[in-house]
Amino acid sequence: MISINTEKIRLIDKEQFETLYQISKSLNSAIYQDSLISDTLDLIIKVINAERGLFLKYSEDTKNYLIIAARNVKQEDIRDLSAFSSGIIQKVIERKEPCLYHDVQNDPNISQFKSIQIHNIKSILGVPIFRDDKVWGVILVDSQLQRKEFTDQNLLFLDFFSNLVSLSLDKITNIEKLSDENSILRNQLQLVKQIPELIGESQSMQRMISLIHKVAATDASVLLLGESGTGKELVARAIHNLSARNNLPYLAQFCGSIPDTLLESELFGYKRGAFTGANNDKKGLFEVANKGTFFLDEIADISIALQAKLLRVLQNKEIIRLGDTNVIKVDVRIIAATNKDLHQLTKEEKFREDLFYRLNVFPIKIPPLRERRGDIPLLVDHFIKKYLGKRIYLDPSAMKILESYTWPGNVRQLENVIQRALILCGDDKLLPEHVIIEDDGDKLTFNGTLKDFEKIILKKRLDEFNGNRTLVAKSLGVSVRWVQLKIKELSDNI
């Protein structure tokens, strides 16, 4: 169906020929971009002196249309297909040949189409695009004015363009197919690809790793939520390493228990003479991290005054050094972390609500170790290899102690316990007596009755698991029914 009459090429003027040459180069370029057809349609509208253009895909099986690009003379997108004449589109498809209508309002064969009357369309050019001898799509340009430029010569130009598209369809389709397949494979890879720094195969860890992969591909602000010792800094660094900024700076700043003035000078920098001891200009960490990633740990601890300055960084991407009046532009991805309930703090007016929503674009909850006990053997093995560089014998009873403990200090506490045990065992065998876990005083010095002890441990487990009786039962090695009966029995004291 694709044919190019070389004799007819002479009928195309210089501007049209140069446009076709430019379009052919684009269609045969190494990289196919989504904007290519829109840009090409703009060229056609300009050369033909039309007011609007449409490039649509047609399915012979479903008889449906799909807009690939629709533009007006102002190079704006047109989203509504009904703005064009579906009757003319259908005629081009049925006739399988180019169509030219100089004055559609007075043409008895087509003037009855409602879209022509509604939109006051006067002139139309339409050509089919073929693939495998079937109509794959339609190119349509029209005008609401009497256009002398809607000529056989311009119809020929449009026909040549449709032939170029037909010749490029295999390439375009294959590139789109490869792009789709690549997206699918990347998505599937994210579901299984591990992050070396984050050890664990539990469902909660796999969910978190999947979220890390997804958000790393963006520049969105991330808020890491989790208890102390769960590994928030490791997650922040993983997001940076997987992002497009991975070759640029990564900085981290702990915000807890640091005097406000000191933290402000560290974050924003200062000018010479800004305060006593400021003998030279100093860049703040936001400037140093420009184009990279900045991790702010324990963000809930910063003052309201400093929160306002941080909000400016997120909203306007700018800072002002202490003692200065000049605004400095910075492009920094912010990852913040806290072990506190920021939403509750905003209700108590201890944390700015606008800053909370700026930080909370993509929250990630890091699971505590007690919610992923199945990962404890993997973590223990990891820490043994980390500190000894080899595997050693681990007594099953020692592992049972490690797996049954609730780990209020999470992974950090587990690492400390393993490091201490390895020192005691002398890199030979790790036995139960080497596992020393410092617990809170009420367990270590308890002198009450068994019922009193049940009250204490049941209340602690209910607090740890936010009242989830199933998790409490699992942690105690008992049935949910037992927990329910005990709660009822001890309800006056719990």
Image (cartoon, helix red, strand yellow):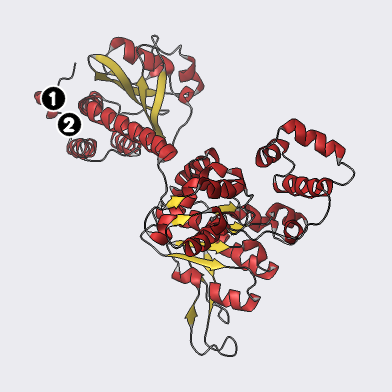
Percent of width and height locating residue 126: 32, 21
Percent of width and height locating residue 53: 37, 30
Q: Quadrant of the N terminus?
A: top left
- Camera-side residue: 64 or 423? 423
SS at badge 2: loop
- Camera-side residue: 282 or 136? 282
**Residue ID for mark 1:** 8
Percent of width and height locating residue 415: 52, 58
Query: Image point 30% across, 26% down: which residue?
Result: 150
Q: Amino acid at mark 2?
A: Ile
Q: Amino acid at mark 1?
A: Lys
Q: Is residue 169 visible?
A: yes
Task: Evaluate if marks 2 and 1 touch, with contact meaning CB atoms under 8 Å apart.
Answer: yes
Tag on residue 12?
Answer: 2
Answer left or right for 17 relative to 227. left
Q: Is residue 365 visible?
A: no
